[in-house]
Each structure stands twice: as C-alpha cells, then as structure tokens.
Amino acid sequence: MKNQVNPWLTGNLTVLIIGMLPAIVLICALLYFTAWAFAFSFTDLALVGRKSVEWSWVGLENFERLFTRRGFLESLWTTVIFVFFSAIVGQSVLGFLLAATLRGTQSTLRTVVEVCIMLGWLLPDIVAAFLWSATTSQTGLINQLIVVPLGFPPINFINSYALPVVTIANIWKGTAWSYLLFSAALDSVSREVVEAAKVDGATPFQRIWLVQLPIIRPHIATNMLFITIWTFTYFPLIFAMTGGGPGRQTETLAVFLYNQSFSRGNLGFGSAISVAMLLIVGFLSLFYLRLLREPK
C-alpha cells in the first residue's frame, strides 16, 4: 500500500504556512533594506544632486568619519545618558516601584495612578511632545503654578534644561509598559512564599530584594531588553520637542541619523550611522539575552 498523507495534517500545515506569510514577508523586507543600508554605507550616495545618481564607492571612509569628526561620538554619549536615565533608571525602576506599591490594593488612588500612567502611553508622540513643550515653556504650567508664585522669574525649561525635560517626558510616556509587565510578574509570585519570608522575620525590603526580585529575574531582563532598544532608537518625541537642540544638547543617534540623511542629504554617511546603531543594538540584545538564561 502506498503511504497516504493525513489530510488533517496537510490542512493544518497549510493554515500554519499561510498564517506565517506576513511575518516571513516582513522579515524578508527587513533583511532586504538592511542589506541595502549596509551596501550604501560604503558609498558617497546623496539625497539630491549629482551624487544621488552618480554615486561611487568610498570604502571605509564613512566609518572613519564616525570616529574622526564631531557629531557621532557626541550623539552616542547623549544617547547613552538618555537611555540610562530614561529607560533603565526611569521607566524600569519607577514601573517596578509603582507595581510593588500598588500590588493587591483596590482604591481610588490606584485607579488615578493607572489612568495617568496609561494616558502617557496611549497619547500619540506628537500630542505628548506638544503637551510637554507647552508645560515647560516660559509661559507654561510649571512657571505659572510653581516658579512665579515663589517669586522667581519664569524659566524656559525646554531651552535651559532640554535633555532632562526630554528624559522626564519619555519616562512619563513609557513607564506604562514596565508597570504592566512588573504587575503581571509580581502577581505570578506565590503569596505563600512571600508570607513564609514574612513569618521568618524578613522586612518588606528584604521580601522584595531576596524573594520577589530573584523570582521575576527573567521578566526584569525582558523588560530591560525591550525598553533599552526602544529608547536607544527613539525619535518622534525628541524631534518634535527640540529637533535635537538647542544646539546639539538632545541630538541622540536617531536624530543625528535623520539630520545627516535627510536634512543634509548625506545618505551614504547616514547608512553608516544606521549600521553602527544596528551593531550597538545587537550587542545590547545579546547582553540581555545572556541575562535571560537561568543561572546554573
């Protein structure tokens, strides 16, 4: 007898392949554009002008330019500061503290806090940028409610403290993700384990540090992986609020890439910047994926 293929298996395999088609197409498109960006990073391709058509190969000149001219290293340092205080210290720590504090409580205060957190996450980036620009301007809400009533002259925070303002705005914008993830992670911790530690005399801080944190370690690494990558490549809020200014105070790598590629039209150099960003993000991803591994 000839081997017959199970119709049920064939049908389900077909459905599986069809369901995976959008992901396969997306991955292929991503690889295609990544390959082109990598190829263009070795050229002097321009957005307009003669070099937009008659471009030529320049070898490693664009990559040498990253480290020999001003711009890239300064933007990299600005990005590191922005990511550290906005994502690692701000969103992650604040999200965990809020999740741990509000865990198991049912009150109006928790509802108000959650609404405020989710509001920042749900608002479009442009709307959030306008809101924070208006709040921190010389005639904004902070000056009208705090600075001026205390007898001080109004301060244009967005000009005088551009990077801290953008950092705080991004913390407010993205803390909801960390809060939701840590809330779910803490809810998965057995209450019996926490109660046993409490009976053994562990303080609230010790219960969190020695009991809960080790249990939710994979969730912490997952959260850090996502928010670090998102913040490292984040563009809309910063560009809408400051455009990278004043001067270059808030010119992160994403803004620097945009300015070089589209404002100045240096697509070859911009491609080199994107390749460098891809390598940095890849290194960070590998670092966090190692943290996800359970210790032996």
Image (cartoon, rainbow, N blue to C red):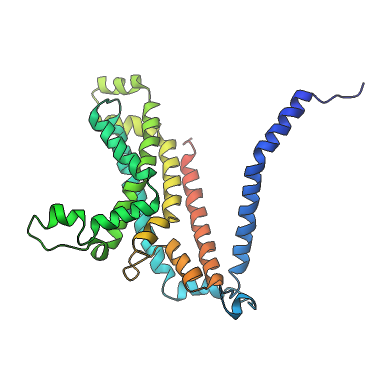
Q: Residue at x 33, y 42 (%)?
A: 119
The part of the image, by quadrant, that contains residue 42 is bottom right
Residue drawn 11% across the image and 58% down it:
148
Is residue 280 shown to the viewer in this render?
Answer: yes
Is 240 drawn above or below residue 110 in the view shown? below
Give 76 or 11, whichever is nearer the viewer.
11
Q: In the rendered view, tell whether residue 178 sits above or below residue 28.
A: above
x and y percent of residue 105 in the render?
A: 27, 26
Query: Which image quadrant for residue 202?
Result: top left
Q: Could you tell me how many numbered marks the image carries? A: 0
Q: Nearer the viewer, residue 257 or 220?
A: 257
Q: Position of residue 200 (x, y in %)?
A: 26, 21
Percent across and percent down for residue 92 are: 35, 43
Left or right, 130 with reference to 108: right
Q: Residue at x 60, y 64 (%)?
A: 38
> Does 34 appear above or below 99?
below
Check the image and report above or below for 272 versus 236.
below
Camera-side residue of 6 and 125: 125
* Quarter in which the N terminus is drawn: top right
